[in-house]
Image (spheres, rainbow, N blue to C red):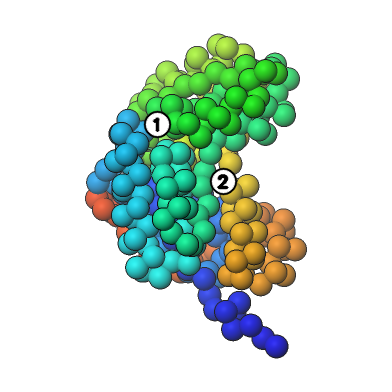
Amino acid sequence: MTNLNILKMATIGIFDSGSGGLSVYREIVKLLPDQKYIYYSDNANCPYGEKESDFVCRRSHEITDFLLGKGADIIVIACNTATGASIASLRKDYSNKFIGMEPAVKPAALATNTGVIGVLATAGTLSGAKYLLNKEKYEDNIRIVESIGKGWVELVENGNLTGPEAEATVRASLLPLMDAGADNIVLGCTHYPFLRETIQKITGPDIRIIDPAPAVARQLVKVMIKEGLLPDTEEAVLEGKSNVGTPKNPDIQLISSGDIQALERIFKII
Ligand code: DGL
């Protein structure tokens, strides 16, 4: 017998403080080109990185209400800072599933040859209990060096991804990690992958840059299958699909609490 719930197209709600979460969306939509998307950028309150975690948690609840009101079946918190500040409380207060982000310390720790890894993230993420607990697991065996990508979120929101200003800003936060001998650098903020070209220009090809978005997209598919939001045949094709590009006409609604142009600018390049 056909299960009608499984055939219904799911609506995936995604939010971030700004355009950064599009680095997660672009990986999700490669795997799930036929679903419906609502993307919320809290640009009016961006950046989240230096804000009180109570404020970020409150905004995460308000945005969740908004996305659920628009029909979202599942929510991707495409923001490390908001995940750290709010995922436990969101999971307590709502019955739908949440997929969150966290700095990918594990793959970096497993791959390092120098025994030093770098984590780039916001101040909020680096001081959050969730991150501190996670990194504790690895610190006996490797050294973890951290740096805040100072001014990086603003570069992305302004569409300033390459060129002398972007390079100078990126270099200032990267150098401490390079000087410490990090051979694997984790991008622990969803805005940072949009600066990848500039980052890699400064580090050179021998330092590995880790963006957790593809793994998060695969995790979303697994959870959606489990929740009956996708047919279970979907998992078998995951690997093949992750190699294709962004579909031409995805069903996505872009919403911003502030400057929608900032969001549209990044959307155009993904
Ligand atoms: N993109 C976000 C993150 O992953 C937030 C950056 C910010 O607003 O400071 O942490």
What's the residue type where badge 2 is placed? Ala
For the point 39% across and 31% down, the residue is 124
Q: Which residue is mark 2?
A: 213
Identify the image quadrant of residue 181. Answer: top right
List x then y, in percent, for residue 176.
50, 14
Q: Is residue 260 left or right of residue 167?
A: left
Q: Which residue is mark 1?
A: 124
List x then y, in percent, for residue 177.
54, 17
Q: Is residue 136 left or right of residue 61?
A: right
SS of the residue under disc 2? helix
Q: Is residue 62 left or right of residue 35?
A: left
For the point 58% across and 31% down, the residue is 134
Count neighbours of disc 1 (C-alpha within 10 A) and say few if under 14, some if 14 to 19, many if 20 or more: many
Is residue 86 among the parts visible in the rendering?
A: yes
For label 2, being within 8 Å of ligand 1 is answered no
Upstream in the sequence, badge 2 or badge 1?
Answer: 1
Is residue 21 among the parts visible in the rendering?
A: no
What's the residue type where badge 1 is placed? Gly
Quadrant in which the N terminus is drawn: bottom right
For the point 39% across and 65% down, the residue is 68
Count neighbours of disc 2 (C-alpha within 10 A) and say few if under 14, some if 14 to 19, many if 20 or more: many
For label 1, being within 8 Å of ligand 1 is answered yes
* Residue 207, placed above or below residue 87: above
* Residue 227, placed above or below residue 19: below
Question: Which is more toward the observer, 197 or 16?
Answer: 16
SS of the residue under disc 1? helix
For the point 66% across and 33% down, the residue is 106
Question: Mark 2 or mark 1: which is in front?
Answer: 1
List x then y, in percent, for residue 57.
35, 44
- Farthest bottom residue in view: 1
- Farthest front residue in view: 92
